[in-house]
Image (tube, rainbow, N blue to C red):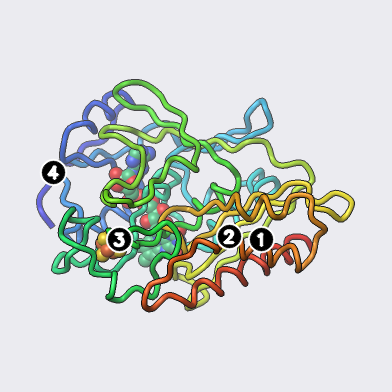
Amino acid sequence: MQSFEFQRARDALSAIAAGAKSGTRFVAGGTTLLDLMKLNVERPEHIIDINGLPLDEVEPLADGGLKIGATVRNSALAHHPIVQRDYAVLSQALLAGASGQLRNMATTGGNLLQRTRCMYFRDTAMPCNKREPGSGCSAIGGANRTLAILGTSEHCIATHPSDMNVAMAALEATVHVQGINGERNIPIADFHLLPGSTPQRETLLEPGDLITHVTLPPPMPGKRSLYLKLRDRASYEFALASAAVVISVEGGRIARARIALGGVGTKPWRSTEAEEVLAGQRVGERAFRRAADAALRDARPQSQNGFKVELARRCLVHALNEATR
Ligand SMILES: Cc1cc2nc3c(=O)[nH]c(=O)nc-3n(C[C@H](O)[C@H](O)[C@H](O)COP(=O)(O)OP(=O)(O)OC[C@H]3O[C@@H](n4cnc5c(N)ncnc54)[C@H](O)[C@@H]3O)c2cc1C
Ligand code: SF4
């Protein structure tokens, strides 16, 4: 690990000004950043610790929504009574991630920005367009069993790894950012970018941008929700496929559905295709299967991850069955 300067942020504005300088990174829980520094994948010259900023509250909003500070720990958020009551899918997704110790450190802002677990990204001896633009993608034709089948490009097929962000996508969260040019509110559907020809650019953030908080809209009336995560072992493992569903049913028919998939996309994968298929349909396996087919219609599997197409379909059908039971 190379040497670096470390500084504690005194206030948001000075942190943003310092953060805009090249070679600077914010650190919150450190569970992504320090991990990648030990592997020499991240080599910041300056690190700004944002844990002292007043961004660690969960607060109800006047419109019935919820404001979540950027440094709220994943464990605190998962166990917050309002989240458990009104946004259970988020609590379930957080508790399905990592381990108890990691969740005690990991923050809302850091989780939004966690990096892919593609093994070539984490190995500086191997070509990787995301780590070193233009060097090539070792995963295409290489070890790609855990990688993405939706949203890929010829330059990168890395899976977006977060569980929390999949639930946030189904809940239609908004990410609030403060930067050198002021404040921006970014819908989570736009926050993460597809890899295209620039896989090194993962979000809409600019240098110095500080995530201050995330807001959730008021809970969907009459909603039922569920996060289902399928993985190689029961804990401390990333998703091979996951589904976040938020659904309301009236008179046996689906009034509204919000669907997002994890473990299969290059970003948290909101499926408006599945939502459209479900709207107005009678609750049941037939509609759920049609929705799952729509969600996976554009899947482009690689040499080792074709199994994910059927796994993700079944994951979504099962999640819908359980949520509406
Ligand atoms: C062994 C292991 C297993 C894991 N398993 C899972 C899993 O199953 N599911 C899952 O979802 N996740 C998993 N994770 C990932 C974990 O959830 C993330 O590492 C964590 O959420 C990152 O949060 P952090 O606060 O520690 O981020 P940090 O490491 O502090 O920061 C991550 C990045 O975000 C930037 N940053 C942080 N906060 C802000 C902010 N407010 N504004 C702007 N930039 C910011 C930092 O500069 C850095 O680039 C696992 C991690 C490990 C190490
Ligand atoms: S899939 Fe993306 S992260 Fe993995 S080697 Fe290819 S370019 Fe790098």
Q: In this rendering, which labeled residue sits more in front, label 2 or label 4?
A: 2
* In this view, the mark in front (4 or 3): 3
| Gap in angstroms between the C-alphas marked 1 and 3 | 27 Å
Task: Answer with mark 1 or mark 4, whichever residue precedes in sequence.
Answer: 4
Q: Nearer the viewer, residue 169 or 129?
A: 129
Tell me, yes or no, whether the two marked residues, 2 and 4, touch with CB atoms within 8 Å: no
Q: Would you call the spot at circle 1 few (<14 residues within 10 Å), some (14-19), or many (20 or more)?
A: many
Q: Nearer the viewer, residue 109 or 126?
A: 126
**Which amino acid type is shown beneath numbered disc 4?**
Glu
Mark 1 → mark 2, Cα distance in angstroms: 6 Å
> What distance separates the C-alpha of mark 2 from that of mark 4?
42 Å
Give SS at disc 4: loop
Specify the amino acid type for callout 3.
Answer: Glu
Q: Is residue 199 left or right of residue 276?
A: left
Per the rendering, the mark at residue 154 is 3
Tell me whether circle 2 and circle 3 mark residues in contact (CB < 8 Å).
no
Q: Position of residue 40 (x, y in %)?
A: 16, 59
Amino acid type of disc 1? Ala
Q: Earlier in the sequence, mark 4 or mark 3?
A: 4
Q: What residue sits right under mark 1 in the picture?
A: 291
Look at the numbered discs 1 and 3 and tell me whether their residues touch, using CB distance below 8 Å.
no
Mark 2 — residue? Answer: 295
Q: Residue 150's image quarter? A: bottom left
Q: Residue at x 75, y 48 (%)?
A: 223
Residue ID for mark 4: 45
Check if mark 1's residue and mark 2's residue have beta carbons within 8 Å: yes
Q: Is residue 98 visible?
A: no
The image quadrant of residue 265 is bottom left
